[in-house]
Amino acid sequence: MSIEQNYQNILSQLPQNVKLVAVSKTNPAEKIKEVYDFGQRAFGENKVQELLEKQPVLPNDIEWHLIGHLQTNKVKYIAGFIAMIESIDSEKLLKEVDKEAAKNNRKIKVLLQVKIAKEDTKFGLTTDEAKDIFNQYLEGDFPNIEINGLMGMASFVDNETQIREEFSVLKNLFDELSQLKLLETLSMGMSGDFPIAIGSGSNSVRVGSAIFGERNY
Ligand SMILES: *Cc1c(COP(=O)(O)O)cnc(C)c1O
């Protein structure tokens, strides 16, 4: 299938309330421009260096999402233009984003990345750490960021029940925190598991290879 067919095929599977972040990592700017021309505006990248190469040569109404582990010393390079940092995995990182947002006279939207996969050691906060950070935020810490929601990745397994259980942990946390202050974005689901994620309450999916084709790394 062509990229356009892939893209339309994914769109056709998303309910109206679910946002698509097209994960363009490893794909060249020309391919991103193709998908942009189909109407897509939100793109996800996981490496600062790669993002900094693509951002200047692509239309400036693209809404860039950072979805990968972010080192604190690299925040300054993206703070001026990033639409959302989905991968806040430590308090230290959040502090740095807050500081750089202030320098750029803007508020930066972020998601707290929570570790929900049982199997491996992906980056992410524990649910307790996420709650703790959110409470500090409610008390007025981090005035230059907006905690807009939560992000999580399920285990890479075939077991649907396990995937569903992992997503439900994040959905429950999302509902719990939303009682304190309404959260907007629950980012769960990738090419292999986005239908399950949507069934579990996701309203933002991060889909890469199902649009752009398999990555070879
Ligand atoms: C690469 C990546 C995706 C997209 O993965 P696909 O399987 O290609 O859809 C989503 N989220 C994160 C955090 C990623 O690193």
Image (cartoon, rainbow, N blue to C red):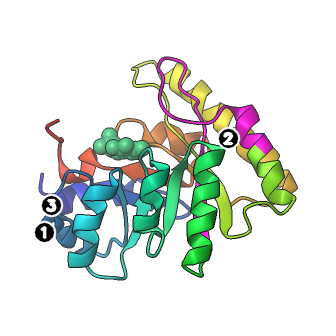
Q: CA distance from mark 1 to mark 3?
A: 5 Å
**Residue 175 seen:** no
x, y percent for residue 187:
54, 50
Mark 2 or mark 1: name the one nearer the start of the chain: 1
Task: Identify the residue position indicated by label 1 in the image.
Answer: 30
Quarter of the render that holds ligand 1: top left
Q: In which quadrant of the rendered view does residue 33 lie?
A: bottom left
Q: Is residue 129 magenta?
A: yes
Q: CA distance from mark 2 to mark 1?
A: 36 Å
Mark 3 or mark 2: name the one nearer the start of the chain: 3
Q: Quick check: 177 left or right of 115?
A: right
Q: Is residue 216 above or below residue 37?
A: above
Q: In which quadrant of the rendered view does residue 36 lie?
A: bottom left
Q: In which quadrant of the rendered view does residue 45 lie?
A: bottom left
Q: Quick check: 200 left or right of 176?
A: left
x, y percent for residue 147:
67, 59
Instruction: Inspect the image, locate mark 3, and give the three-letter code of the amino acid beneath it.
Output: Pro
Task: Identify the residue position indicated by label 3 in the image.
Answer: 28
Q: Mark 2 vs ligand 1: CB under 8 Å? A: no
Task: Identify the residue position indicated by label 2 in the image.
Answer: 171
User: Foreground: 183 or 145?
Assistant: 145
Instruction: Inspect the image, locate mark 2, and give the three-letter code of the amino acid beneath it.
Output: Lys
Q: Is residue 45 above or below residue 189?
A: below
Magenta-tinted stretch: 108-132
Going 78% across and 57% down the picture, which residue do you hit? 137
